[in-house]
Image: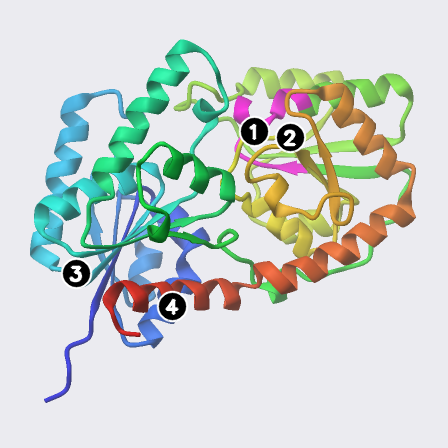
Amino acid sequence: MASRSKKLLFVVNAPEFFLSHRLPLAIAAKDAGYEVHVASAAGDDVQGIQAKGFHHHTVGFARSGQNPFVELNTLVQLVGLFRRVKPDLVHLITIKPVLYGGLSAHMAGIDGVVSAVSGLGTVFLADSKGAKLRRWLIAKLYSLAFKQKRLAVIFQNPDDRDTLISLGALEPNEARMIRGSGVALADYPQLSEPEGNKTVVVMASRLLKDKGVFEFVEAARILLDRGVSVEMRLIGSSDPGNLTSVTQHDIDKWENEGVVNPLGYRLDIAEQYAAANIVCLPSYREGLPKSLVEAAACGRAIVTTDVPGCRDAITPDETGLLVPVKDPIALANAIQRLVENPDLRRRMGEAGRALAKEAFAIEKIVDQHLQIYKEVLGDD
């Protein structure tokens, strides 16, 4: 009798995030013989998941997390889902699925869990009493979520890993390191820089305060005052459901001021990077930002902040420049340096493409995940 295919259940808060960050892994797992299930909130992209031949299950992940009854209902839904599907392995992605899914897996008796911690957030950078209390609470929640018999916790940068280990949330032997979600190099080709009267700098991100949007805009003002010939393009849209989002009023004001060129939400990031000379992300903290991995693949010099995640996406002074967080003057200085040194930009772009091939190629990222699956399932 043929052996049963092992069930792999991905749990992620939004279906679009699954398609943008985990689809190649799910396809590879299906090709390797897994029966792939995906649990997420409802959304238009559910059809895209089902079209790939995956089983989809709807779970009510709320964005804000401010209603305790809604959050408890999510936990109950996950426990029920795990008991119905009986997965051999659960892969939990993003904060809520990691925390709620970990607790639910424990209650449902699921032994094999892979948790992907893609970033701990800016609360781990603050030193206020409130931030310290939240850190303690978050560490306790992670500790409760990491109570499986067979567990691997994937981190994208060593700072997040070392923080949770130091807080006692998990054991060192349970931690794994994979640098980001990978990039399909063929979809992000390295093309020559565009030629024009102005050097183009692009920031592609969710337009949130902690992504450094306001620092990017202020750096643009500084460069404009200095007479530097540069066009600062901002890709992304406001998110009214997020308290830290910039507003449409902010975006309109910046456009009218002529300080940045807002392009809105775009899916053609490879084309946008090809039309730029420099890629910038002045974020406050990240897991390992996909936007910078894609920029490296496109062979573009990078300016980013010296914080966890961002600094791990580049080789400092080889593929890009690091600046202090929340420092628009330093950001402007770094951008101006690259604007005025096209040869340095091109050398950094070449080195970035080499880094992408070595560390970020999607095939390598997928292989690392599949090996972790085997370890957790005891198939080695």
Q: At 36% from the left edge and 63% from the top edge, which residue is drawn?
A: 372
How packed mark 3 is, by other alpha carbons closer than 10 Å (few <14, some 14-19, many 20 or more), is: many
Mark 4 touches mark 2? (CB < 8 Å): no
Chosen colour scheme: rainbow
Which residue is tagged 4?
371
- The quadrant in which residue 220 appears is top right
How packed mark 2 is, by other alpha carbons closer than 10 Å (few <14, some 14-19, many 20 or more), is: many
Mark sitting earlier along the chain (4/2): 2
Examine the structure image and report whether residue 101 is included in the region drawn in magenta. no
Mark sitting earlier along the chain (3/2): 3
Q: Which of marks 4 and 3 is in front?
A: 4
Mark 3 touches mark 2? (CB < 8 Å): no
Q: Nearer the viewer, mark 4 or mark 2?
A: 4
Which residue is tagged 3?
87
How packed mark 4 is, by other alpha carbons closer than 10 Å (few <14, some 14-19, many 20 or more), is: few
Q: Is residue 301 left or right of residue 313?
A: right
How packed mark 1 is, by other alpha carbons closer than 10 Å (few <14, some 14-19, many 20 or more), is: many
Say which element carries label 1.
Answer: helix
Q: At 57% from the left edge and 15% from the top edge, which residue is drawn?
A: 249
Mark 1 touches mark 2? (CB < 8 Å): yes
Which residue is tagged 2?
282
The residues bearing labels 1 and 2 have C-alpha atoms spaced at a distance of: 6 Å
Region rendered in magenta: 203-215
The residues bearing labels 1 and 3 have C-alpha atoms spaced at a distance of: 36 Å
Extreme residue in the bottom direction: 1
